């Protein structure tokens, strides 16, 4: 099963703090690691090279003595130029991470022409340039047509719900269930990933589940969607009848369950099957009734108004005709 997209909602104020703190911690950790990596690169170069080697001297050393360090001194500037050239074609986070860790090992080859301070500027300036998206080190991408994307763990943290506890939240609910008023998307660890209505956004939206045959799409719908969806009505298209067989008994404890089957197996509601529309079998809040409510005792008498069955039949005929 694959969750295609999750519409990002505004998280509560208490949930936004850990996300910002985690991002700041990652930036700080990467900065410290990059600094330690740069210091290590300088120490290694000074250990093997007493002073910077000019390119012409390095070429002579390589051809005369085949020293590997001379070859590294020659090719390092080439890799630096290639790194800057490919910056517009790589995701900025990946490029900044690779440049921050790899450039300190290549830049000392330019020590014969640049001081240590200028080398530090050459190391840090491209990272800031690419991160801000300035030309020519960053590509000018057109504005995106949509904002849909794969959900990350940070997005899912705002949707996590703890499983219910037996006889604590509700006496009739079993332990381990998701919130009754939420739409279940899946699980993350031991917690449920659910979407609930918000005061600023009451609609729950939609869910799309894609998977190969026999991958569990129907099981997800019967166990997590219909099984956990409590206190709300649901209209289900059940071609095979599997959802009805699996959840009708459970959902009948919350309310009435009706089956509308074109083959005639299920509840009777066909206003076109009777000669007099006032005798159609109609659903009401108290059950099922025969005929127009105004003519329960005299259905053959015209009331002069549009009865529910007549209006429904008219809509069905209009839809079939169009």
Image (cartoon, helix red, strand yellow):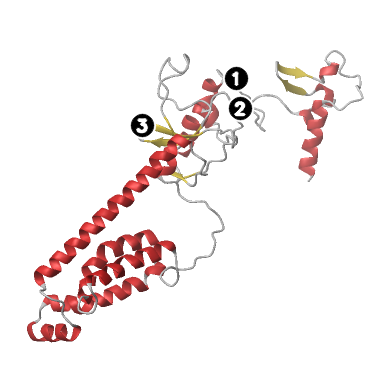
- The residue positioned 52% from the left and 21% from the top of the image is 250
Q: Disc 1 vs disc 3: which is toward the camera?
A: 3
- The residue positioned 83% from the left and 15% from the top of the image is 296
Q: Disc 3 vs disc 2: which is toward the camera?
A: 3
Residue 167: image quadrant is top left
Q: Which residue is mark 1?
A: 255
Asked if residue 214 lies left or right of residue 237, the reply is left
Closer to the N terminus: mark 1 or mark 3? 3
Between the residue at mark 1 and the residue at mark 2, the CA separation in whole angstroms equals 9 Å
Q: Does the residue at mark 1 contact the one at mark 2 (Cβ under 8 Å)?
A: yes
Query: Residue 109 location, x and y as percent?
Result: 20, 75
Q: How many marks?
A: 3
Residue 318: image quadrant is top right
Disc number at residue 235?
A: none
Disc number at residue 190?
A: 3
Disc number at residue 233?
A: 2
Q: Residues within 10 Å of mark 3 (few under 14, many from 20)?
A: few
Between the residue at mark 1 and the residue at mark 3, the CA separation in whole angstroms equals 30 Å
Closer to the N terminus: mark 3 or mark 2? 3
């Amino acid at each position: 099963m694959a969750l295609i997209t999750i519409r990002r909602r505004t998280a509560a104020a208490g949930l936004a703090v850990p996300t910002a703190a985690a991002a700041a911690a990652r930036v700080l950790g990467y900065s410290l690691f990059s600094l330690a990596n740069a210091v290590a690169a300088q120490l290694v170069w000074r250990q093997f090279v007493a002073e910077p080697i000019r390119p012409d001297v390095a070429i002579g050393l390589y051809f005369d003595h085949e020293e590997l360090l001379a070859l590294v001194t020659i090719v390092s500037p080439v890799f630096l130029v290639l790194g800057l050239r490919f910056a517009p074609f790589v995701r900025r986070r990946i490029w900044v991470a690779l440049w921050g860790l790899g450039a300190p090992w290549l830049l000392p080859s330019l020590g014969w022409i640049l001081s240590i301070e200028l080398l530090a500027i050459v190391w840090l300036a491209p990272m800031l340039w690419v991160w801000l998206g300035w030309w020519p080190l960053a590509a000018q991408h057109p504005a995106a047509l949509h904002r849909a994307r794969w959900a990350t763990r940070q997005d899912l943290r705002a949707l996590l719900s703890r499983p219910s506890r037996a006889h604590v939240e509700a006496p009739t609910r079993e332990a381990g269930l998701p919130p009754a008023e939420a739409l279940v998307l899946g699980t993350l660890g031991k917690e449920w990933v659910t979407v609930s209505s918000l005061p600023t956004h009451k609609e729950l939206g939609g869910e799309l589940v894609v998977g190969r045959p026999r991958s569990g799409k129907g099981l997800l719908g019967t166990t997590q969607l219909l099984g956990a969806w409590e206190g709300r009505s649901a209209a289900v298209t059940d071609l095979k009848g599997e959802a009805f067989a699996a959840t009708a008994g459970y959902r009948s404890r919350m309310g009435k369950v009706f089956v509308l089957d074109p083959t005639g197996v299920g509840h009777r509601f066909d206003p076109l099957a009777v000669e007099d529309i006032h005798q159609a079998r109609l659903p009401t809040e108290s059950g099922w009734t025969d005929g127009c409510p105004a003519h329960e005792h005299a259905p053959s008498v015209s009331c002069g108004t549009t009865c529910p069955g007549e209006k429904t039949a008219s809509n069905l005929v209009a839809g079939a005709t169009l």
